[in-house]
């Protein structure tokens, strides 16, 4: 059948299970008498959960605007008049809960707007948002994920990282996805689990049916339905060969590459789960360049406490050699990467707080847990999505306060360097000033590409499939500013997996690369064979680049011009 693009290499053979994740669309569904009680119960339980959620958020909100927003929403949520309207629509008009909710809030707004009440005019947005949140909450509980009890190939149109992580992952041998992109959060999670995966397999959920036997060859990008034994045997040989070459590497010897001119290139790992740490034994790396801490808590139904976090961070550091540094990135939640305990609304607040305001409970809790764990290994801490100078200044201030308080409490804290991700165009453009406040940068090409090219990283487009001239210019600027400030600069987005740019990135002055574990050996070998020196006259060339093809040409030229 038609193949897509490989996310994780490997071979898998098992029975298909189809999962379709339908977007929340509200179709007017009429219900029978027998369904009335159930629909009313669905509405009231979604309302109660939303109430708890908003109440908690209002208590923890650090800005008055956020508190006001939530408190107003609560008023409309528990309004007995609207509740009665919704129930009547379910009982009398036989509407399903979603339609009854949307219609009731819509009519309520119209009714109040015609009365020209300025208070309501002002709250129209809040009421609409509330109705949508309620419906989402209702749907979240309605989505039935497959109950996986035996080895399967999961075939889906799309699935969120949080949904995926709640499945019985050990039994998932392979994944085929109709949509998706190499930079997506789901791709990152899949790479971390090493489950062979192919994305963009058009119509997979329509062509494949439940229980079809599926063979995925995610080395050669082939998918076979109901294959013959001979074919299965020959494809499976490839896995054996690849495992043999993987185990031949001693991770603690091949930590970095020294180039012919003495320059050292460090190779680090991107990690998202505890399970992945064990795999590090099989691959060469001298540290973890990006630990995506948000993925540790994706399937929590409430925010993890300081103690829970401390325990996990301590375990991670204790399981690794002393000098093996771990760069913990603080929580980086957003609409595409939400744990079960968050809604888009709360994520927005956290995102705003993480990078902007001081004194937020979430960030303080995480920093305390991290710093308390620091004595158990070599720790770095990195903040995501930083783009403004004063927001970073207040973040650094907050960090220092948290640290001072812990020291006063008698907690032993090791030397921790702090850094930021440069993953927005604003961050790259401001990197000269930002460099003065931190010890290192890490360039995140996934978000940098998404925000520079104005295209979602979750779907494949011609703008985000390769290194673009605009992104290259921002990378070059960031590296330049890091060098001027004499701070370390690493690159950690999925773009690094495309080895067609390695010579250029090395020539630019990048000498720390962080990639998914199973790319480590390949990267290390390519660094060695590429053996590129730092090029001092690249800036003029880069300034003139207009097309993606010119970038590839420049990369080739650099390889050919090696002395
Ligand atoms: C990035 O944006 O490039 C990055 C490495 O971070 P994440 O993929 O976790 O957003
Ligand atoms: Mg990012």
Image: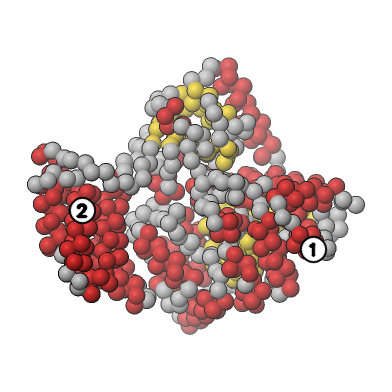
User: What x and y, as percent, mark residue 225?
Assistant: 49, 23
Residue drawn at the location 39% of the way across and 27% of the way down: 210
Left or right of 300 in this view: 392: right
The residues bearing labels 2 and 1 have C-alpha atoms spaced at a distance of: 60 Å
Residue drawn at the location 44% of the way across and 69% of the way down: 352
Residue drawn at the location 29% of the way across and 74% of the way down: 68
Q: Residues within 10 Å of mark 2 (few under 14, many from 20)?
A: some
Which residue is identified by label 1?
Answer: 540
**Relative vertical location of residue 234 with respect to residue 153 in this rendering, above or below:** above
Left or right of 210 in this view: 449: right
Which residue is identified by label 2?
Answer: 103
Is tag 2's residue or tag 1's residue first in the polypeptide sequence?
A: 2
**Relative vertical location of residue 259 with respect to residue 396 in this rendering, above or below:** above
Residue 18 visible? The answer is yes
Residue 419 occupies which quadrant of the picture?
A: bottom right
Residue 218 occupies which quadrant of the picture?
A: top right
User: What x and y, as percent, mark residue 423?
Assistant: 58, 62
Residue drawn at the location 83% of the way across and 63% of the way down: 537
**Relative vertical location of residue 485 with respect to residue 92 in this rendering, above or below:** below
Residue 262 occupies which quadrant of the picture?
A: bottom right
Left or right of 160 in this view: 456: right
Q: Residues within 10 Å of mark 1 (few under 14, many from 20)?
A: few
Mark 2: secondary structure = helix
């Amino acid at each position: 059948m038609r193949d897509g693009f490989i996310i994780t290499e490997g071979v898998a053979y098992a029975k298909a299970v189809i999962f379709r994740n339908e977007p929340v669309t509200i179709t007017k569904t009429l219900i029978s008498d027998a369904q009335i009680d159930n629909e009313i119960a669905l509405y009231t339980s979604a309302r109660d959960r939303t109430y708890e959620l908003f109440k908690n958020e209002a208590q923890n909100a650090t800005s008055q605007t956020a508190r006001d927003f939530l408190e107003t929403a609560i008023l409309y949520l528990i309004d007995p008049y609207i509740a009665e309207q919704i129930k009547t629509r379910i009982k009398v008009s036989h509407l399903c809960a979603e339609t009854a909710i949307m219609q009731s809030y819509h009519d309520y707004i119209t009714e109040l707007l015609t009365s020209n009440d300025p208070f309501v005019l002002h709250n129209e947005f809040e009421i609409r948002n509330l109705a949508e949140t309620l419906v989402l909450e209702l749907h979240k509980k309605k989505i039935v994920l497959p109950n996986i009890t035996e080895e399967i190939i999961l075939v889906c149109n799309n699935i969120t990282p949080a949904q995926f992580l709640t499945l019985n992952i050990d039994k998932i041998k392979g994944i085929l996805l109709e949509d998706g992109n190499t930079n997506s959060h789901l791709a990152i999670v899949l790479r971390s689990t090493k489950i062979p995966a192919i994305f963009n397999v058009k119509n997979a959920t329509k062509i494949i049916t439940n229980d079809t036997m599926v063979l995925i060859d995610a080395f050669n990008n082939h998918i076979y339905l109901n294959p013959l034994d001979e074919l299965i045997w020959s494809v499976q040989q490839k896995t054996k060969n690849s495992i043999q070459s993987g185990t031949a590497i001693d991770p603690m010897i091949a930590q970095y590459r020294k180039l012919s001119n003495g320059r050292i290139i460090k190779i680090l790992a991107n990690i998202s789960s505890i399970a992945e740490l064990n795999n590090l034994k099989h691959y060469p790396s001298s540290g973890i360049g990006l630990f995506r801490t948000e993925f540790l808590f994706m399937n929590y139904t409430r925010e993890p406490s300081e103690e829970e976090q401390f325990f996990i961070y301590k375990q991670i550091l204790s399981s690794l050699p002393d000098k093996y540094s771990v760069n913990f990135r603080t929580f980086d939640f957003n609409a595409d990467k939400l744990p079960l305990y968050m809604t888009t609304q709360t994520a927005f607040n956290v995102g705003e707080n993480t990078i902007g305001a001081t004194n937020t409970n979430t960030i303080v809790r995480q920093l305390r847990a991290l710093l308390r764990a620091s004595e158990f290994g070599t720790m770095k801490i990195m903040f995501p999505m930083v783009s403004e100078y004063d927001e970073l200044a207040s973040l650094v201030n907050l960090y220092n306060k948290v640290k001072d308080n812990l020291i006063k409490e008698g907690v032993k804290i090791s030397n921790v360097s702090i850094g930021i991700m440069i993953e927005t165009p604003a961050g790259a453009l401001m990197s000269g000033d930002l460099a003065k406040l931190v010890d290192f940068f890490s360039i995140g090409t996934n978000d940098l590409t998404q925000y520079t090219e104005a295209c979602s990283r979750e779907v494949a487009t011609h703008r985000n499939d390769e290194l673009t001239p605009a992104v290259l210019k921002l990378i070059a600027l960031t590296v330049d500013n890091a060098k001027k400030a004499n701070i370390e600069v690493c690159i950690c987005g999925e773009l690094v997996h495309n080895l067609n740019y390695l010579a250029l990135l090395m020539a630019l002055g990048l000498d720390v690369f962080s990639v998914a574990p199973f790319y480590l050996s390949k990267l290390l070998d390519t660094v060695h064979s590429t053996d590129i020196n730092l090029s001092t006259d690249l800036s003029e060339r880069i300034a003139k680049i207009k097309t993606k093809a010119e970038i590839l040409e420049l990369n080739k030229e650099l390889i050919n011009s090696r002395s």
